[in-house]
Amino acid sequence: MFSVPALAAGDGVVLMQSGANISDQASLQRGAQLYFNYCGSCHSLEYMRYSRMAKDLGLTEEQTMKYLNFTSAKFGETVVAAMPAGLGEDAVGGEDWFGKAPPDLSLIARARQNGPNYIYSYLLSFYPDPTRPSGWNNTVFPNASMPHVLWDRQGIQSLRAADEHGEDSHGHAGPTFDLVKPGTRSPEEYRQDARDITAFLQYVGEPAALDREKYGIWVILYLLLFTGVAYLLKLEYWKDVH
């Protein structure tokens, strides 16, 4: 049994705490690998360049272009989806498969309220639904057009009826799932997969956050030191004033 811990979004959706850490470079690398293998065929990252991603993730140009680029894009260009977005005579595009072009995900972690928690919960909340064209549905984003592309890793989980939903060990209520067919990853390993993809998309939404967090502590220390110097200077200037 798998229950979704509570963190209410603005629209009433119950989310889980992702625990994603963009300072964990290994997590970002794993998330990038999973993203490009499972998501990059349909979803572009039009505000991210391969060269910038390689620099921030500690990858060489050869590693980036060999393992993360499945298009004809060059190292200095932005990330485009391998599948054409629109309808066309010569190629099958996203609109043909899903009814509309899959969205760019550059800013998904910032566009959604509680963005990282939203992404993480979304990746954990797919269940089979024969009424949907893709055969899948999602409790976080009901009636989504996207199929569960990571089902082979997570396995297949069924959604319990609303009156059978329970609480997790922390007393958080939410949709409850039963794993009916294991995947290639254990539940904890798949949660780590979801956390890695979330961290990667959080990084893509604000690459500067890596530098901001790195240098933030030094800025604070500088301000504290400057405050101390300014206070001593004030004492020196005002020592003869009674």
Image (spheres, rainbow, N blue to C red):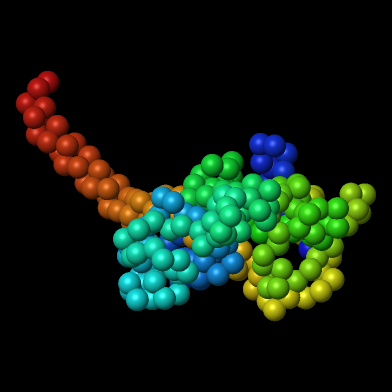
Residue 167 visible = no
Q: Residue at x 81, y 74 (%)?
A: 181
Residue 216 visible = yes
Q: Residue at x 75, y 53 (%)?
A: 138
Question: How far across and how far down the image is residue 187, in percent?
Answer: 71, 71
Q: Nearer the viewer, residue 13 or 99?
A: 99
Question: How far across and how far down the image is residue 6, in percent?
Answer: 72, 49
The answer to which quarter of the image holds residue 227 is: top left
Q: Is residue 183 left or right of residue 66?
A: right
Q: Residue furthest top?
A: 242
Question: How far across and how far down the image is residue 229, in percent?
Answer: 16, 41
Question: How far across and how far down the image is residue 239, in percent?
Answer: 10, 29
State the quadrant of the C terminus: top left
State the quadrant of the N terminus: bottom right
Q: Residue furthest front?
A: 89
Please, is residue 204 above or below residue 242 in the view? below
Across the whole image, how many numbered discs are drawn on residues? 0
Q: Nearer the viewer, residue 188 or 148?
A: 148
The answer to which quarter of the image holds residue 93 is: bottom right
Q: Residue at x 79, y 50 (%)?
A: 173
Q: Is residue 201 left or right of residue 206?
A: right
Q: Is residue 61 left or right of residue 132?
A: left
Please, is residue 199 above or below residue 221 in the view? below
Q: Residue at x 58, y 43 (%)?
A: 112
Q: Residue furthest bottom?
A: 184
